[in-house]
Image: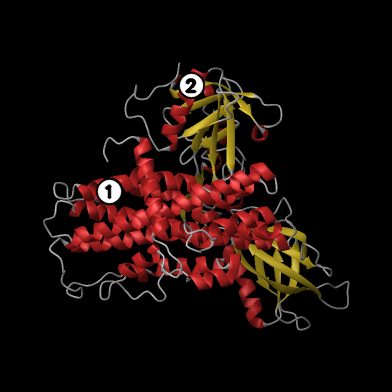
Amino acid sequence: MEGASKEEKLASVFNLVTVFENSRSPGAEPRAHRLEAEHHRPGCRPPSPAGPLEKPTVGETLESGPRTVSRRYLSSLKNKLSSGAWRKSCQPGTCPAPGMQEPEEKRIVQELLETEQAYVARLHLLDQVFFQELLKEARSSKAFPEDVVRLIFSNISSIYQFHAQFFLPELQQRLDDWTTTPRIGDVIQKLAPFLKMYSEYVKNFERAIELLATWTDKSLPFQEVLTRIQNSEASGSLTLQHHMLEPVQRIPRYELLLKEYVQKLPAQAPDLADAQKALDMIFSAAQHSNTAITEMERLQELWEVYQRLGLEDDIVDPSNTLLREGPVLKISFRRSGPMERYLFLFNNMLLYCVPRVIQVGAHFQVRTRIDVAGMKVRELTDAEFPHSFLVSGKQRTLELQARSQEEMISWMQLQSEELGLRAPQWVRDKMVTMCMRCREPFNALKRRRHHCRACGYVVCARCSDYRAELKYDSNRPNRVCLDCYTFLTGNVLPEDKEDKRRGILEKGSAAGSEQSLMCSFLQLVGDKWGKSGPRGWCVIPRDDPLVLYVYAAPQDMRAHTSIPLLGYQVTTGSQADPRVFQLQQSGQLYTFKAETEELRGRWVKAMERAASGWSPRGPNDGDLSD
């Protein structure tokens, strides 16, 4: 298929879809299920009654309705991925001898190709049938928003295009040329980095299922489109939820097959080194998806806690971690007895709350927020109030009573959160876009991310240019932020540090434009940029070729927007204006308009390169600017 045109590749994919559709008949087991059954041969893989790749039967799916996929399923999948049980391959001597003349490793590649063909057909069904039909109905009937449809399907279009136009043709070509080129390790190595795009899909999965259930109940036209497609032969009488599970389960399937392939290769096989390296990369991608599942569950639980607290603006922060919650009694000498209260302990704050008598919306009202940094906790000795303890912080001091000695001891562990006594839980880099102290946005050159070793905050170099001794690290000096430095040392900011803080300049657009792959003015169109539709100076720097920076003017020292381009789709806008183009990914949509069609063409080319992960190799490589 080398040298084939894009239309020929797409035609081959559509032929696969036809095969996929024709292989299904009423009462017959779907092709994907047959492949799954063949995949688990006795002796070569662990039995799969409770394996992570197990799918619900057709009957179960139809009976359980649109809410069959839940966070419990994802949690179960994550646990099985983490346990490594599904990665157990057959031991030498346990597999039956090959019954065919062709090498065993070639049969594994054939199985990989067959499952990939069925998978591409399923992706075609998701992207070109379900997604496009729902989008078409949303535009024509206005019965439900287009954005809802885009959120449900996340970045499935990017996943489909990658597998249909790149990986499947490459895999097919290698199998056709197996006699002269018996290897797939190098192809898998090219595939593996792009599998990280699955994390976006997995993180969005639960939200997508909830939106799907909500709008199925809420909108009759939405429900009618789903029913029509689900009852078709192409869908095999399976629900959309069932098909949407395929991408979640695909990466573990790659690893399982590739692991067996490596095991079956002869010791002197030319593909052994590449295949082993490819297996390591696939394992890394699988861990990436597993991390995405964990992160999704953490955010979901955190969001539920914030809802109980009334979604107050100064509390809601996705980078926080809930450590403990529970009821306590507030000791008050103005009243005859203790009063019921409730505590929420996060990694950076303690919330002292009052339960609401009438629970409409929020369940609790936040009375006091106490910063964990510098907070002291100690036991109180009071015969009248047993199991009592004192919490003292910058904002307030509280005398509290637990219901038992065990509960008091567990709350007393707050003391271990004191700065410097133990290593903090680091806030994840991707959860913040700006310094958590000075609130200035990060960028690739002058304002990079660092972690304070005392509180775990993500801070810039300017705000973490201090050293303090930490007890958990044998009193060795560690990088800390200014707030922790002041608390731990009792020292104020030295004058030379103050001058240094004021003297640092951020990377300006003028410097970025001189060393850029592409730069020009673009009209910023649509509500994403505000109703005024301003003009922005847009730059893709050579030293940061995967990010688009948008400045208000060419000489500005700070960009007001930066867009990581990797994984975005670049599309043309409305036919009415050929100068318009768009960036789109999982609900995010940015619209631009160039001054000329020729300029638009160069911007589209530059952004498509960045979206695919391309980087310049030399000083003059890929320069598209004027």
Mark 1 vs mark 2: which is more N-terminal? 1
User: Residue 161 lies in what quarter of the image?
Assistant: top left
Residue to which mark 1 is pinned: 172
Q: Which sits in the foreground, 564 or 515? A: 564
Q: CA distance from mark 1 to mark 2?
A: 43 Å
Circle 2 SS class: helix
Q: Amino acid at mark 2?
A: Ser
At 14% from the left and 46% from the top, the residue drawn is 180
Q: How is the image coloured?
A: secondary structure
Location of the N terminus by quadrant is top left
Residue 436 in sight here: no
3 above or below 239? above
Q: Which mark is residue 308?
A: none
In this rendered view, identify the residue nearer to me: 295 or 469.
295
On-image quarter of the C terminus: top left
Residue drawn at point x = 37 percent, y = 33 percent: 615
Check disc 1 and give the amino acid type.
Gln
**Residue 330 visible (yes or no):** yes
